[in-house]
Amino acid sequence: SAAEKGGYDYFMLKEIAEQPKAVSDTLLGRIDGAGQLHLDEIRIPPRVLREADKVVIVACGTAYHAGMIAKYAIEHWTRVPCETELASEFRYRDPILDSRTLVIAISQSGETMDTLMALRHAREQGARVLAICNTNGSTIPRESDAVLYTHAGPEVAVASTKAFLTQLVACYLVALYLGQVRGTKWGDEIQSVIGQLARIGDEVEAVLDTMEPVRELARSLADRDTVLFLGRHVGFPVALEGALKLKELAYMHAEGFAAGELKHGPIALIEKGVPVVVVVPSPRGRSVLHDKIVSNIQEVRARGALTIVIAEEGDTVVEPYADHLVRVPVTPTLLQPLVATVPLQVFACELATARGNEVDQPRNLAKSVTVE
Ligand code: G6P
């Protein structure tokens, strides 16, 4: 009903708008005023976390994209090797796991069959399983050793939005916590990122406040056949998520690529007028990432692409190459997906609506895939 949608036309719009609160709820009680992490819910003994020699993340769909981003964060802050794998692939091969493996299963619903089977498989090999889940008392957390709930509130729209952002927050919390428990040379950075994570709700709000040009752009592209997405580092999974949203909602051909792979195939798809969304990392910090992606934008634009550039406030270098420029707040490199994904959600939702699609119930899709 209209009341359930809180005045919005669709649950998806409501859930996009709820993201600042959702991410703050994920953080609630988990970072104190002194910047200390409180994650006692992770009832896996610190000794086990210190001795873990590998992290394996399993998930499906949008949750898998959160897991891909988590890999960058976990390896950076903990120096423990981490792999992220689609649950449906993981469970049917012969993965190497033992009691020193920490498995993280990410699932909004807690009922996705492939993710559940992957975690059962992992536990049979002696691995510890931590669930990151949004649904209290669902099967995946019940069968895991520990659970970190995302507290996003119920997500009704089939295409995941607030659940994704809160999964990211939960993943960062786990990565930072593991980094602290294990003690790495990144102690100062971890402390400063915790402070920035604590304020991320305001940054997400700031993005939502500036989305009108993105909606306008989406409407202008409603009759296109293809949209391509490019990203590097944590921007790569963001590109994949942007493309997934567009497939799910707009039923368009949408593909995400690692920008470094452009020359290995995708550049052949570029022709005059093809929209290419580029997720640009911060020019601060690891500026080599930024230089590389600026070259990629120039390469596609020289071949006629319509460039839609998502870049940090104050990044003037990209301006000459952007047909459309979408600004996101300054964040630490690893946290950028929390702000960079939001315009892509709005873009897909608006484009789908302009095409006359039912955004809350896209054709052929289910909110939770409980069958194989
Ligand atoms: C379905 C939903 C997606 C979701 C995926 C994984 O495909 O349509 O939005 O990302 O399942 O769901 P889960 O509940 O495990 O996060």
Image: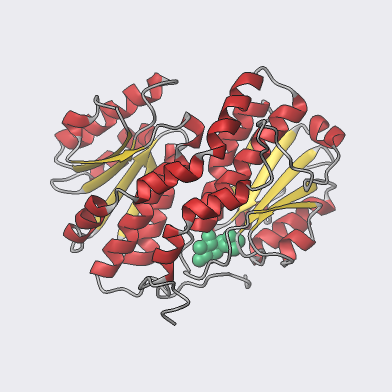
- Which residue is nearer to you in this view: 301 or 8? 8
Instruction: Name the residue at 77% across, 58% down.
Output: 120
Location of residue 364 with respect to 99 vertically, above or below? below
Q: Tell me if 13 is positioned left or right of 120 in this view.
A: left
Instruction: Name the residue at 74% across, 55% down.
Output: 119
Residue 11 visible to the viewer: yes
- Which residue is nearer to you in this view: 294 or 157? 157
Image x and y of residue 340, in percent: 39, 43
Where ligand 1 lies, by image quadrant?
bottom right
Location of residue 256 with respect to 191 vertically, above or below? below
Give the image quarter of residue 231.
Answer: top left
Image x and y of residue 189, in percent: 59, 22
Q: Tell me if 246 is positioned left or right of 29 in this view.
A: left
Residue 239 visible to the viewer: no
Residue lying at the far top in this picture: please name it. Answer: 185
Give the image quarter of residue 336.
Answer: top left
Q: Tell me if 365 is positioned left or right of 372 in this view.
A: left
Residue lying at the far bottom in this picture: please name it. Answer: 1
* The N terminus sits in image quarter: bottom left
Location of residue 363 with respect to 173 vertically, above or below? below
* The C terminus sits in image quarter: bottom right
Image x and y of residue 297, in percent: 25, 33
Q: Tell me if 276 is positioned left or right of 248 in this view.
A: left
Image x and y of residue 344, in percent: 35, 51
Instruction: Name the residue at 34% across, 62% down.
Output: 349
Location of residue 178 with respect to 171 vertically, above or below? above
